[in-house]
Amino acid sequence: MRKITGQDHENLPRGVVTARKCDCCGHHEIGITTQDGEYIQLKPGMLIQVLEEINYKRQIK
């Protein structure tokens, strides 16, 4: 799992928000899965930017 630091602004990851079980204790966590398949756990205080909103109700029709 990659750690993002303040110096990484030029290389910020892009991906899809996903949920999974923690490898250590089995609790559910939320993060971002990048195009390369890398999972980056989201933690309180992290700054994120939403680039696209998917409307699931519209897709069901």
Image (cartoon, helix red, strand yellow):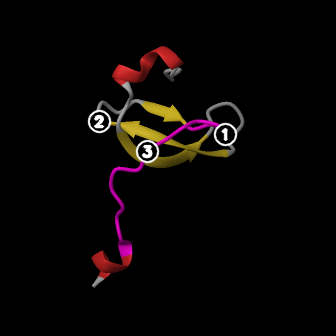
In reply to whether residue 10 is colored magenta, the answer given is no
- Where on the picture, by quarter, is residue 58? bottom left
Q: Is residue 51 magenta?
A: yes
The residue type indicated by label 1 comes to: Pro
How far apart are labels 2 and 1 at the CA level?
23 Å
Q: Residue furthest top?
A: 7
Of marks 2 and 3, which one's residue comes earlier in the chain?
Answer: 2
Q: Which numbered mark, 2 or 1, is in the foreground of this view?
A: 1
Please report whichever mark, 2 or 1, sits nearer to the chain's N-terminal start. 2
**What element does badge 1 sit on?**
loop
Q: CA distance from mark 2 to mark 3?
A: 17 Å
Residue type of the residue flagged with mark 3? Gln
Tag 2 near tag 3, CB within 8 Å: no
**Residue 29 sits in which quadrant?**
top right
The Cα–Cα distance between marks 3 and 1, rounded to whole angstroms, is 14 Å
Identify the residue position indicated by label 1 in the image.
44
The first of marks 3 and 1 along the sequence is 1
Specify the principal SS of the magenta part: loop
Q: Eyeballing the image, is 59 above or below 37? A: below
Q: Nearer the viewer, residue 49 or 25?
A: 49
How many other residues sit within 10 Å of disc 3, few (<14), some (14-19) or many (≥20)?
A: few
Which residue shows up at 47% across the image and 14% down it? 7
Highlighted range, magenta? 42-56
Please tell me which residue is depicted at 63% across the width and 37% down the height of the picture. Answer: 22
Question: Which residue is label 2 attached to?
Answer: 35
Q: Residue at x 47, y 48 (%)?
A: 18
- Judging by the rendered image, the residue that carries numbered circle 3 is 49
